[in-house]
Amino acid sequence: MGAQRDDQPEVVVHVGDGSEEPHLVDPARPGACATDPAPEHPFLLLTRTPTDRIQARYLDDGTYELEHTTGAEHRQLFTTDALLVRDIVWSWIQGDTWWSDTVAWTTIDPAIAELHALHTELSDLLDGISLMDSVTDELDRALARADELLDADFDLDLGE
């Protein structure tokens, strides 16, 4: 398979394993980074440029969401077929047109994409607030227990 081909731009891979470091991939030899997304790696994002990317996400209901952006065009599809996800991603990495010519993509309206981005941002914000609620609940329980212990200790001191 040899060195990276000059006619292919570099592909950067981001995986949902919590890794902050992107992984550079030779399109001729993608190695482990071209495997199917799975529950322990819920997303796989590959970029050539900021406006040319493809992303696969594994959703809670067992389906995969694929999104592709080329310039201003934003397309999406949903499938339960992990092999189709793999084939689309691999075709995109290789620069083959099969993934765009053969697969039935749905174009996402820019207004809907903007609403989705706002929803994601607000969901992240609300998740942070719910985390604070759970921390507050834990603190309340700890303070209540401390009050119980202090009251019990105080009652013992008065009983003497």
Image: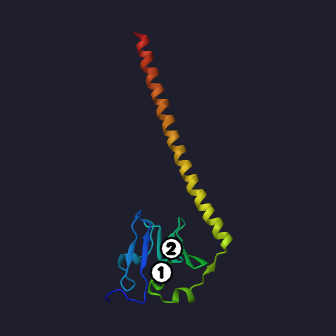
Q: Residue at x 43, y 87 (%)?
A: 8
In terms of depth relative to the viewer, which is nearer, 18 or 103? 18
Q: Residue at x 49, y 39 (%)?
A: 138
**SS type, badge 1:** helix
Image height check: is 64 above or below 155? below
As drawn, is 26 to the left or to the right of 54?
left
As drawn, is 144 to the left or to the right of 4?
right
Point out which mark residue 56 bears: 2
Image height check: is 18 above or below 8? above
**SS type, badge 2:** strand
Q: Quadrant of residue 90?
A: bottom left
Image x and y of residue 109, in percent: 67, 74
Q: Quadrant of residue 75?
A: bottom right
In terms of depth relative to the viewer, which is nearer, 11 or 116? 11
Point out which mark residue 69 bears: none
Which quadrant: the C terminus? top left
Q: Residue at x 52, y 48 (%)?
A: 131
Task: Indicate the amino acid at tag 2.
Answer: Ala
Per the image, the residue denoted by label 1 is 89
Q: Can see residue 102? A: no
